[in-house]
Amino acid sequence: MLINQAMEKLAQMKLEGFLDGLREQMGSPAFGDMPFEDRLGLLVDREYTLRENRRLTRRLQETRLKTRADVEDVDFRAKRGLDKRVYLELAGCSWISRQHNLIITGPTGVGKSYLACALGRKACREGYRSIYYRFSDFIRELTISVVDGSYPKLAAKLAKRDLLIIDDWLRDPVSADQARQIIDILDDRFRSKSTLLTSQAPVPSWHERFKDPTLADAILDRLVHDAHRLELKGDSMRKNTSPLTENGH
């Protein structure tokens, strides 16, 4: 039968969504009275949705987010200085399309990482390619890549990502060699890609975290001037949500 041949060809072309939708239509009398154009449209939508879901899955996997976080689950009731309107505007990802940066600062436990991961996940849902690092892992990977000769490959990969997320930025002091590597990465991304940083240290204190002040000037010049800022405050949310705290221990 021609339909069997058509289904075999769909399988060979790996049009799995189209093929599954066709099988569903053939097995259900509910589609019998539907016009051909409508049935074809449903099949195309089925294939398109399947492919988009696969692309999203790949983007999320390559991002390697620390936490599964969603913008819809962000707690705006906590007293930490988070402006709901501003954050939801950032969740629209227009700052990424404009190649701006974002800096989230505040004391430990106020949810900086969660907010960053939620924005990273939303960026993936909007079709942007992202990648997440803790600062210590970022420095370690840069250092190892220089030693084993894979630095050009790593730099090329980072240059292609629409959003680079570095969590706990400047947790440790930065040597001159590390600063030079960071500058190279930022040069490739300057006003062409976006970077999101979270840090316990307020921005005015960043300069002193670098061993070489000249390199510090160069790095901060590439990061700070085109950056939106969320400056959080308040007690640790871990403390406020601890069952021991709730029970009075």
Image: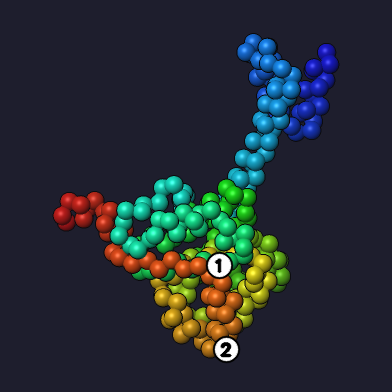
- Residue at the location (63% across, 55% down)? 129
Is 106 positioned to the left or the right of 33 in the image? left
Q: Quadrant of residue 40?
A: top right
Q: Quadrant of the C terminus?
A: bottom left
Is 187 positioned to the left or the right of 166 in the image? right
Is 180 positioned to the left or the right of 196 in the image? right
Residue 150 at least partly seen: no
Is 193 positioned to the left or the right of 197 in the image? right
Front residue of this view, candidates 109 and 150: 109
Q: Is disc 2 surrounded by few (<14), some (14 to 19) or many (20+) residues within 10 Å? A: few
Q: Is disc 1 surrounded by few (<14), some (14 to 19) or many (20+) residues within 10 Å? A: many
Which residue position is annotated with label 2?
214
Residue 138 vs 128, above or below: the answer is: below
Residue 96 at least partly seen: yes
Residue 19 vs 127, above or below: the answer is: above
- Label 2: element kind: helix
Q: Quadrant of residue 115?
A: bottom left
Q: Earlier in the sequence, mark 2 or mark 1?
A: 1
* Marking on residue 101: 1
Callout in the foreground (2, 1): 1
